[in-house]
Structure formats: C-alpha cells, structure tokens
C-alpha cells in the first residue's frame, strides 16, 4: 500500500464539506423565526426550497474539490477507501451530529463511484455510532408542573414562548386551550398533582405555522402534545389548537408533509424525544420531518436490510 495515500486528508476534506453544509443549513433554519414573525410567506417557500437543494449542491462542491486536489488514480482507487472511512470515524467520534456525518460520507462516496461498488468496508451501510453516547447532553426541553392550576401553567408556557409580534388575544386562547385540554384528556389526569407538560425548547416552523411540540405525562401515562400557532397579519399570533391524539400528531410528522425548520443542536436527541412521544413512528420519518431527508433514507434502508436479514420475506416482481 503506497505510503503517500492521503486517507486522512480526504477524510478531512469530506468533513470540512459537511461542516460547510451544516453551517448553511443552520443559517437558513435560524431565519425561520424572523420569517414567521414578519409574515414573509414567499420567503418561507424560497427558504424551504433552498434548504432542500442545499444538500446536493454541497455534495457536488466537495466532489469537485476532491477531484481538483487529488489525481483520479488515487482518489478513485476503491480498494483504499477503507482507510478513508477509518480516518473519518476518528474525526466524527466526538461530534453531536455524527450520524448525519456518516450519511454525508456515503453521499460523497456514491458521487465518486458507481453504486455497484457500495460496500460496508468503504462506506457506512451499517452505522458505527453507539446507541448510548458518552457525550454530556444539554437540556433541550422545558417542563411545567401545573399542580392542578392548568390556567396558570398555560399562561407560563406562552410567557416563555413569546415572539416579537404579540398574541392577538391570549386570554381568549388560553381559556380555549384549557377547555380543549380538559376535553381531550381523562378527568383524573387534569387533577393529578404529578401532571407535567414537557415541551421542546425550540419552536418548530413550517409554511405559515409555528408549532410547540412535546408531551403531557403523569407517573404512569403520557400523551403527545402539539400546539400550532398562526400569524394573522395585522392582527397578531393566534393559538390555533391543542392536539393530544397520537394519530393526529403522527400525521403532522408524516413524510408527505413539508419539512419543519427547527433549531436542533443534537439531532439524535431530538429525534429520540419525538420517538418517545410517537413510538409508532419510524425514525426515518422523524429525521426527514426536520429536514434531514438524506439521513432519513439511510435509516429506512438500514431498517429494510435488517428486516430482510431476519425474515423469509422476499421481493416479488410486479408485472404490468
């Protein structure tokens, strides 16, 4: 094996490209709050399209950079790419978005080589990420304990989740939300002194709406919780509904919907939080729902090959 093989340099170039992609992804996502507050509906659609296109644009840039930096006889020697993968693993081990970095590596590899060269030795068919991380994780949720005072708790929620635009009529909305909460849940739940509401600390944005997402739970049971907000121009922000039905919340995070924009410092933890409140939802859909659609495909593919490895199911040709 030639000593000049620059495995570590290639791994670093790939990861630098990932950092560039993540920074641009974050810039677009971070603008979601201002676009919602300023009712910039056309800009919202443009930002959504730009963020979808961003991934392939940045993958293409990295591919071009690699071709410019290395000769093809070195870069395209597939037998030497296990060294690149090994060097890359060492680089991403301490990251909080390491699972996304693996998918990024796969995209670069597939851009350089034809798909018949795909193997787990050269790319991440199976993840190398541990299910339990060593990293210290920061809190990403807020917890509220009404202690039977539902009205006071709801008022505190919307004090914490305020915007530069005022609420149109918060007292009206709070009264309606309390009534919905009492209607949606068994009577004993609202009287339980240990009742808690846990909300993700960042607001989710999609199209013309903003969403507070979390769960309602007692010692023994839990319900998902989504509170959609609408910005009615010239009138302010209105609290649209309070949703606790798991099937309805699952539809909100369906792959058929457009992607949310949300500030997520640790993607795996947020997806884990969503998975706890929507246990029937596959993590592929959850990653996709917050804009990481490529990683959603990775998770779907891994679930498929794991299923095929543990079942007698086989594909059947569908003849037209």
Image (cartoon, helix red, strand yellow):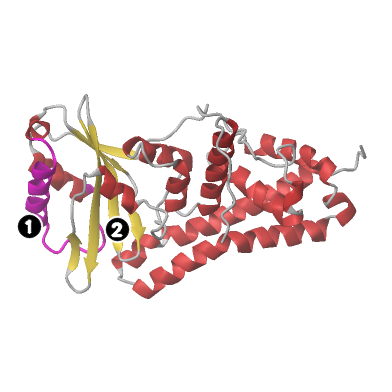
246 up-or-down from 129: above or below: below
* Quadrant holding the C terminus: bottom right
Q: Are marks 2 and 1 in contact (CB under 8 Å)?
A: no
Q: In this image, 63 relative to 143: left or right? A: right
What SS does tag 1 mark?
helix
Q: In this image, 201 relative to 24: left or right? A: left
3D distance between C-alphas at marks 2 and 1: 19 Å
What SS does tag 2 mark?
strand
Circle number at residue 210: 2
Q: Position of residue 103 (x, y in %)?
A: 61, 46
Q: Position of residue 33 (x, y in %)?
A: 35, 60
| Residue lying at 56% horizontally and 33% vertically, measured from the top left | 312
| Residue range (magenta) | 160-186
Q: Nearer the viewer, residue 84 or 106?
A: 106
N-term-proximal mark, 2 vs 1: 1
Q: Furthest residue to the right? A: 2
Residue 20 visible, this angle:
yes
Q: In this image, 146 relative to 279: left or right? A: left
Q: Position of residue 196 (x, y in %)?
A: 20, 33
128 up-or-down from 158: above or below: above
Q: How many marks?
A: 2
* Quadrant holding the N terminus: top right
300 up-or-down from 238: above or below: above
- Mark 1, other Cα within 10 Å: few <14 / some 14–19 / many ≥20: few
| Residue lying at 67% horizontally and 38% vertically, measured from the top left | 91
Q: In this image, 205 relative to 312: left or right? A: left
Residue 266 visible, this angle:
no
Q: Furthest residue to the front? A: 319
Q: Is residue 271 magenta?
A: no
Q: Position of residue 71 (x, y in %)?
A: 87, 56
Q: Which residue is mark 1?
A: 172
| Residue lying at 63% horizontally and 60% vertically, measured from the top left | 58
């Amino acid at each position: 094996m030639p000593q000049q093989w620059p495995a570590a340099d290639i791994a670093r170039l790939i990861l630098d490209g990932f950092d560039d992609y993540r920074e641009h992804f974050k810039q677009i996502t971070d603008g979601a709050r201002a676009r919602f507050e300023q009712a910039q509906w056309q800009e919202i659609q443009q930002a959504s399209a730009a963020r979808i296109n961003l991934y392939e644009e940045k993958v293409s840039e990295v591919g071009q950079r690699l071709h410019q930096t290395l000769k093809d006889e070195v870069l395209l020697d597939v037998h030497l790419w296990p060294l690149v993968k090994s060097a890359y693993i060492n680089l991403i081990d301490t990251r909080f978005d390491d699972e996304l970095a693996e998918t990024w590596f796969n995209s670069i590899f597939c851009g350089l080589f034809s798909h018949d060269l795909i193997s787990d030795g050269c790319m991440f068919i199976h993840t190398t990420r541990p299910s339990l991380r060593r990293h210290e994780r920061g809190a990403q949720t807020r917890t509220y304990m009404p202690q039977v005072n539902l009205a006071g708790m709801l008022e505190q929620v919307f004090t914490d989740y305020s915007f530069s635009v005022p609420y149109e009529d918060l007292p009206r909305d709070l009264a309606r939300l309390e009534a919905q909460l009492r209607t949606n849940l068994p009577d004993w739940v609202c009287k339980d002194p240990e009742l808690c509401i846990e909300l993700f600390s960042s607001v989710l944005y999609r199209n013309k709406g903003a969403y507070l997402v979390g769960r309602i739970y007692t010692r023994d049971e839990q319900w998902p919780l989504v509170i959609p907000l609408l910005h009615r121009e010239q009138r302010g922000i209105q609290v649209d509904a309070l949703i606790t039905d798991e099937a309805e919340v699952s539809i909100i995070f369906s792959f058929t919907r457009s992607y949310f924009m949300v500030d997520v410092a640790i993607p795996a933890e947020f997806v884990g939080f969503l998975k706890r409140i929507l246990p029937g939802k596959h993590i592929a859909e959850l990653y996709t729902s917050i804009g990481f659609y490529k990683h959603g495909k990775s998770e779907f593919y891994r679930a498929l090959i794991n299923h095929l490895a543990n079942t007698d199911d086989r594909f059947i040709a569908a003849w037209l």
